[in-house]
Image (spheres, helix red, strand yellow):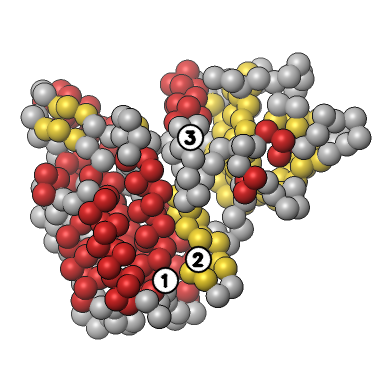
Amino acid sequence: MGCSFSGLNALYDSTTGDVWINENRFKIVRQLGEGGFAYVFLVKEVISDASDGSVSKKFKDPSHISDDGTYAMKKVLIQNNEQLQFVKEEIRISALFNHPNLLPLLDHAIIPVKGTPEQNWTHEAYLLFPVHLDGTLLDNAKIMKAKKEYFSTSDVLQVFRQLCAGLKHMHNLEPPYAHNDVKPGNILLTHRKGQPPLAILMDFGSARPARKQIRSRPEALQLQEWASEHVSAPYRAPELWDCPSQADIDERTDVWSLGCTLYAMMYGVSPFEYALGESGGSLQLAVMNAQIKWPTNPKPVYPEALHQFVSWMLQPQPTVRPRIDDIIIHVDKLIQKFSV
């Protein structure tokens, strides 16, 4: 997997507490987040006179170079071989993509570690990314809600257009890849003065070849089980909730998630999360029936054309759901119509 360690015996420099990823050294500035067995840190590269140079020399794209030497580093504690293969697959898949709206993996290392009674993991993985300190779309939505602020129609469409561009890159690969977990928490936003926010889709841990033929009940159940672990429920397409025994799954699972995400950009939640708050309500049933609940007294009031756009993507039958190229044509028309 190319997870070399350049002869170093340990990831941590015991004298400074610094972290090494291959031959490059980083100082941990602070923790940015955590989830499961993964931790994300803000790190700053330490360049000494004796070193062979900055990590930026490895980058093919100059836009990935940090002006101040800071990056985001994801540390994953790996407990078994299944988790190890999962991380290696994430690294392999990340290397397939090269697009300004997809978060690039800049460097990585996987090292074996000796277990102790307090430590039951066998490997540690270190993944280096560009840092985006303005947070995710989910983070921004929570802050804006507290301030009673909201995205303008123009910004909603411009951010959405960027997500479509990133997904088109994935869907147009040979074979096509699906992200499988498009949601506000996996979209980084960077605010730019006088411009719409820059949107970058991240986390390719669930990304897989998009097209899958299901030809038996066991295959259908296996897909449903995989989706229940890897695809967030409020953004999961109907065919991943209840897969027929004869089905052709394709990249339009992402289109469903896109429709849910566009709704969430406007109203702060997935269009089906209302079911979780209802007595006897079922998220799966709401999704399967595409029972979209629109706010009765919405603030702000978005154009009806955006509601129709969301409904067009949230077709429960995947064969009539639009593809990403169709969506881009439509969103470009909406941008032209509602641009400020």
**Distance Cα–Cα, label 2 vs label 1:** 7 Å
**Distance Cα–Cα, label 3 vs label 2:** 23 Å
Left or right, 251 with respect to 133, comes to left
Q: Does residue 315 show up? A: yes
Amino acid on which the number 2 mark rests in the picture:
Pro
**Distance Cα–Cα, label 3 vs label 1:** 28 Å
Q: Give the answer, above or below, for where 20 lies relative to 167.
A: above
Q: Nearer the viewer, residue 236 or 152?
A: 152
* Rendered residue at 58%/50% (across/down): 33
Residue linked to disc 1? 155
Left or right, 303 with respect to 300, comes to left
Look at the numbered discs 2 and 1 and tell me whether their residues touch, using CB distance below 8 Å. yes
Q: Quadrant of the C terminus?
A: bottom left
- Element type at marker 1? helix
Q: Position of residue 322 (x, y in %)?
A: 18, 51
Q: Position of residue 275 (x, y in %)?
A: 21, 61
Q: Give the answer, above or below, for where 273 lies relative to 230.
A: below
* Rendered residue at 29%/46% (across/down): 254
Where residue 197 is drawn, which disc sits there? Answer: 2
- Label whose residue precedes the other's in the sequence (3 or 2): 3
- Element type at marker 3? helix
Q: Position of residue 164 (x, y in %)?
A: 35, 53
Amino acid on which the number 1 mark rests in the picture:
Asp
